[in-house]
Image: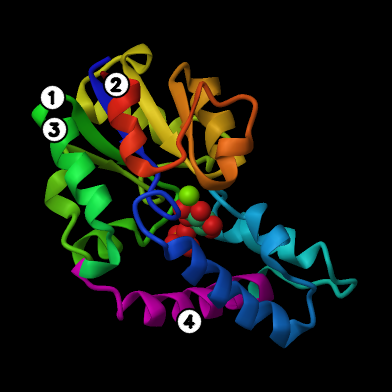
């Protein structure tokens, strides 16, 4: 294997929790039922698709314009939370593991549905650790479509069969398998039977690739 493509939110950093808090603010405002279980359905899917999942819980119909406004509001709350992120929000275990994977000669990429991925990576001083970044700005279809990972592999100059994908989302595991990658599940996705490998802790990746 020659490369590893990492999801960002919920894999390298706890921004999945910040997504939850920002959506919770909007959901409470419109009276949509929203809890951590429903939040798991939003993992890996785009901002607008996430909103559609939340709106399934309300009978009121929203126009496209109103939907865009709700999604923009959520992103505003989320961006304010992101501004507080700093270097120490990435666990030492993550930084050390990434350095060790690089030392083994593996190429590292980001494969995230988020349009805020670069901003987050800059905030936490992780951006220089990656050879390529594929994110919500360079794709048409969000996970479970494999596009974001196929683009990441292309940017690395690698074939999908030579790359692992590390994911915390069911949609991400599905995308990885659809694209022909080896899927490594962590967090929520460690329960997914489609994952080829499961992590109990981030540094377990070193055992998988050795
Ligand atoms: C993914 C998250 O990484 O990015 C999703 O798991 C989120 O929950 C998606 O909806 C899009 O993020 P953003 O930052 O572009 O709203
Ligand atoms: Mg994720």
- Magenta region includes residue 64: no
Q: Between disc 3 and disc 4, whose residue precedes?
A: 4
Q: Is residue 52 visible?
A: no
Mark 2 lies on residue: 209
Which sits in the foreground, 186 or 6? 186
Mark 3 lies on residue: 102
Mark 4 lies on residue: 77
Mark 1 lies on residue: 104
Q: Secondary structure at mark 1?
A: loop
Whole-Å distance between the Cαs marked 3 and 1?
5 Å
Which sits in the foreground, 36 or 51? 36
Q: Are marks 3 and 1 in contact (CB under 8 Å)?
A: yes
Whole-Å distance between the Cαs marked 4 and 2?
38 Å
Q: Are marks 2 and 3 in contact (CB under 8 Å)?
A: no
**Residue 58 marker:** none
Whole-Å distance between the Cαs marked 1 and 4?
39 Å
Residue 29, by quadrant, is bottom right
Whole-Å distance between the Cαs marked 2 and 1?
9 Å
């Amino acid at each position: 294997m020659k490369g590893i493509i990492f999801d960002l939110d919920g894999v390298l950093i706890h921004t999945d929790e910040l997504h939850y808090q920002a959506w919770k603010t909007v959901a409470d405002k419109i009276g949509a039922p929203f809890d951590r279980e429903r939040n798991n359905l939003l993992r890996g899917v785009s901002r607008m698709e996430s909103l559609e999942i939340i709106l399934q819980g309300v009978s009121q119909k929203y126009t496209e314009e109103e939907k865009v406004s709700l999604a923009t509001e959520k992103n505003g709350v989320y961006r304010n939370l992101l501004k507080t992120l700093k270097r120490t929000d990435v666990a030492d275990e993550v930084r050390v593991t990434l350095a060790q994977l690089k030392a083994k000669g593996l190429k590292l990429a980001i494969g995230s549905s988020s349009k805020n991925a670069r901003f987050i990576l800059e905030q936490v001083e992780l951006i220089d650790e990656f050879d390529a970044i594929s994110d919500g700005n360079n794709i048409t279809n969000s996970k479970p479509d494999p596009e974001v990972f196929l683009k990441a592999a292309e940017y690395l100059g690698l074939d999908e069969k030579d790359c692992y994908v590390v994911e915390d989302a069911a949609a991400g595991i599905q995308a990885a398998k659809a694209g022909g990658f080896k899927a490594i599940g962590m967090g929520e996705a460690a329960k997914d039977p489609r994952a080829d490998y499961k992590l109990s802790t981030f540094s377990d990746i070193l055992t998988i690739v050795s």
